[in-house]
Amino acid sequence: MAPDGGDGSRSSGASGKSGGPSRQVLKKGPWTAVEDAILMEYVKKHGEGNWNSVQRNSGLIRCGKSCRLRWANHLRPNLKKGTFSAEEERLIVELHAKLGNKWARMAAQLPGRTDNEIKNYWNTRVKRRQRAGLPIYPADIQPKHHQLHHHHDQQRQTNHRQQQHQRQPNSSSSSLSSLLSSSSSSHSQKNSHSLTLSLFNRINFPPTANPPKQHPNSSFLPNSNPQFNLFRDNNGGLALSLTSPSLPFPAATEPWFNPGFSSELFQQTPSLHFNSFRYNNNSRSHKEVSFYPISSLDMGIELPSIQSPLPKPSPTSSANTGSGYIIDATSSDAEEYEIAPEIPLGNSGLLEDLVEESQALTRAEKSKKEKSPADNEAKVKCVSEEAVENLWESSIFAPSSIGMKRKKNPLEEMNSMDDDFLSLLDSFPSTVTPVPEWDDKGGSLSNGRLSGMVTAGVVGINSHREVPRSPVVTAAATPHHEWALGSCCWNNLPGICEEQS
DNA sequence: AAATTCAACAACCGCTGTGGC
DNA sequence: AGCCACAGCGGTTGTTGAATT
C-alpha cells in the first residue's frame, strides 16, 4: 500500500515520502482565492489529473490530493452549489437506499453535486432524523443495498473502521451514516406503516413559463412535477434536470460577492436568466413547503435550507408514531426509480440492528459454506441487479455552475497570505502553455480575468484574498449549451466562464 | 448580550484500486 | 509478481455562522 500516495498530505508536511523535489511544508486548511485561481489556471492549462505535479509546476504549496479535492468539490465547472432541491433530496434518499454510502456513485446521479456534498447532507440529515426519532428512510423507500451487491464493500468498510479503531482507540468514529449503511435494521421496517413524516412533504411547483430543456440524447420521462424533469439517456441512465437553469448564485448584492471577479458576468450576459427557488419555509408547522422560481436578482438573501430542523414532536402526537407530522408523500417522481423493498429492511442505526445484522452475517457465512442452492440464486440476483445498476449509473450531464459560498477573511490568514502569495508568484510558471480545447470555447477565465486578478493581487487587492470568487457561469446556463457535457470529461469543456463574448 | 447548541460546510486522513514499470 | 505512484473513495474532524437558550 502507498499511504497517501506519497502526495505529502501527511501532517508533518514533508512533501512525499521520497523526499521529492521540495521538502516544503505543505499548506493545509482553507483555500484562498489566490490558490484557487492558480489551481484553476493550472487545470486549464494542463487539464485534470497529475495532481501531484500541480505543486511542482504551479507553485501551489498544496499536496496533489488537496488540489484534486479542491478542484473536484469547488472549482470544476458545472458544480451546482446551494441547498439541495426537494427532488435532489428525494433522489439522495433513494440512492442511499439503493447504494448505501456510495457517495461518489450517488454523486454521479446528481448532476453538479459532489460526493462530499451529498455525504455531508446525508450525515446531517441522518443525525437530524435520528434525533427526532424518525426512521432514516421515508415509508415508501426501503433500503435494499445491504444484503445485495454491496455487502463486500461494506465488509471492507467495516474492516476499515475496525482498523481505524485499533489505531485510534479514542476515536469516536463509526459515523452514524456508516453505522446505518452497514446495518440492516428492522426499525424502519417496524415503522414503515406508522411513519408519519415524509421528508418530502407537499411541495407545490407552479407551472414554469419556460419549456423544459431536453437532453438531445435523452428521452423525456413523463413527470408530474413541472419543475423537474427526468431524463433517460442513451445508456438507460436517469438524470434529473430543472426545467429552467437553476443557479443558486447569490445576487451581486451579497456581501461576499466579489464584484471585481465576475459580477460583470451577470451584467454582460443578459441572455442568462437565472432562476432559483424561494423556499417558503413554514418552518414551524412544516406543513407545506412551496417553491417558486424567482429571478436571481431577487436573491438578496441566502436561501433557507430545506434541510431545516424538524420540529419537535408534540408530546401528544408523537406518542404512537414517533412523530407528530402529517404525512403527505405526494412526490410521484420516485415512481421512476421504484426502490422496491424486495427484502424489507429498515435502517435506523440502532445498536440492536447492528447486532441483528451481525447475526445475519454469521448465518449467511454458515450457509455459504454449505453452498445452498439459495446461495446461487442470490448470486444470480446480484448479477442482474448489478446490470441494472450499471445502466442506472450511466447518466451524466450537468448544467450547472460554480457557486461559491461565503468565506471568511480571518486576519491571521491575511498575514500569511503575503508570504504564500509571493512564494507562489515566484514559482508560478510564466510561460504560456497550450490551452485545452475547452478554453477556447468559453473564454478565459485564465488568461483574462484570472491573470488579471493575480496581478491585481500583487498590486494591492490582496486584501481580497479571502473574498470568494463569484460563481462562474457555465455554458449550461446559456440557451445554446451543449447538453451532453458529462461531468467526467473535462477535455471538452465549454469554458469555465462565459463572461466574454 | 453572552453562552450554548446545532447545521452546514470544507478539508484532511487513511485506505483501496489501478496501471505502469 | 512485486513495487511504486497516483487517483479516488469514504470516514472523520474542524470551523463557522445562525439559531436558541
Image (cartoon, coloured by chain):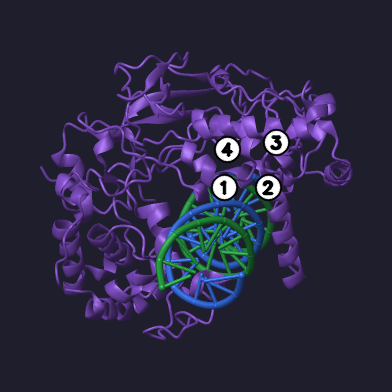
Chain colours: A purple, B green, C blue
Q: CA distance from mark 3 to mark 1?
A: 14 Å
**Residue under pointer 4:** A308
Q: Which is more N-terminal, label 3 or label 2?
A: 3
Label 3 sits on residue:
A136
Of A119 and A207, nearer the camera is: A119
Q: Is residue A97 visible?
A: yes
Q: Amino acid at mark 1?
A: Lys
Question: What amino acid is labelled 4 in the image?
Answer: Ser
Q: Chain of mark 1?
A: A
The image quadrant that residue A50 belongs to is bottom left
- The reply to the same-chain question for discs 1 and 2 is yes
* Image quarter hosting the N terminus of chain A: bottom right
| Among the two numbered marks 3 and 4 on one chain, the one whose residue lies closer to the N terminus | 3
Q: Is residue A3 above or below residue A241?
A: below
- Please state which of residues A417 and A497 is positioned toward the viewer in this rendering: A497
Q: Nearer the viewer, mark 3 or mark 4?
A: 3
Q: Nearer the viewer, residue A30 or A3?
A: A3
Q: Amino acid at mark 3?
A: Ile
Cα separation, mark 4 vs mark 1, equals 17 Å
